Amino acid sequence: MAGLSRLPMRVRSGARVAAALAMVAGTIAVVGTEPFAAGLASISPPTIFAAAVLAAVATAAAAWRWRVVCAGFGLSLPWAEAFTAYYRSQFLNTVLPGGVAGDVHRAYVHGRRIDGVGLAARAVVAERVAGQVVQLVLTLALLLPLGITSPLAPLALATAVAAGVVAVALAAVVARRRGRELLRRELRMLRPLLATPLRLVAIVAASVVVIAAHTGTFVVAGLAVGVTAAPQDLAVVALLVLAAAAIPLNAGGWGPREAVAASAFALAGLGAGAGLAVSAAFGVLTALAVAPGALTLLGGRFRSPAPRGIIGKRRTA
């Protein structure tokens, strides 16, 4: 890993894309091409409309969460700017490898406007991490209590094992002095958010809305494909697949999502082919649903005004 981190950024990006595409190709090779093609063929105008509505809800909630986090850091962020920038961010995350390029872009544009790129980047990172933490807690809270009589019991067991491995790994990192120092530094930076209960409630509430909307899109994809599972079972599986989609080792969202979807559906007794089909449909639907983000790019809204500090210097020169 250390050697990989010293490689040029272009090489690392190419390696991530290659790894993501290899995961998709490997999943298709194991499961077959028919489920993948069936997922793509299931896309229809009604499913696209439903995905677009759910994406609008998720974007509004995520933009609100970003504004709440920015307020905690003392940064200004108008609603219109947050909403359009988040749409643009999601579009870039979908069409570019890695899944974080859009977040880097919105942090830079916001930072240029307020003359504080570093603090704006910190706010974006905190906002994304907060959303992922809520998603992880919600996923574990719904999966782990499932009893052995539940059809999703094997999936719950696999999730428990994975959570245990991650917990042990994190504990090993924190046990080291460098890990403890890093944790303390991050907690100090996040103190403005952690010290205000109402702000935390708002962040959690917004995150739940975002997760619910994305889960709804996954359920729409499942119903379009023709999966016979109950919508609530699809929603539980969706949470695990969405967690995999957040791994920054993808090509426009494709990669770990397909592998985990096939595995999760197989463990849940729904068939790996169904998982791949639903994941393929979900990938296309989410890409189409965030297409309004492209309009902000074409409309020139991505151009940020000059930093206030630079304007001030020119006026006093």
Image: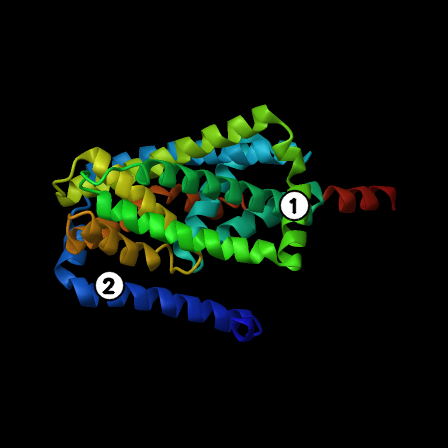
Question: Above or below — where is 76 with respect to 297?
Answer: above
Which callout, 2 or 1, points to the residue nearer the camera?
A: 2
Residue name at image x 68 percent, y 53 percent: 181
Q: Viewer-proximal residue, 270 or 38?
A: 270
In the image, taking residue 231 as reference, residue 53 lies left or right, namely right
In the image, taking residue 217 as reference, residue 203 lies left or right, namely right
Q: Name the residue under label 2.
A: 27
In the image, taking residue 27 as reference, residue 302 lies left or right, namely right
Q: Is residue 219 visible?
A: no
Q: Viewer-proximal residue, 169 or 182?
A: 169
Q: Viewer-proximal residue, 175 or 207?
A: 175
- Where residue 126 sits: x, y (%)? 57, 43
Q: Which amino acid does label 1 sit on?
A: Gly
- Where residue 277 sits: x, y (%)? 19, 52
Residue 47: image tag:
none
Residue name at image x 44 percent, y 46 percent: 90
Q: Which amino acid does label 2 sit on?
A: Thr
Q: Mark 1 points at which residue?
A: 111
Q: Earlier in the sequence, mark 2 or mark 1?
A: 2
Q: How far apart are marks 2 and 1 (CA)?
A: 40 Å
- Where residue 100 sits: x, y (%)? 49, 53
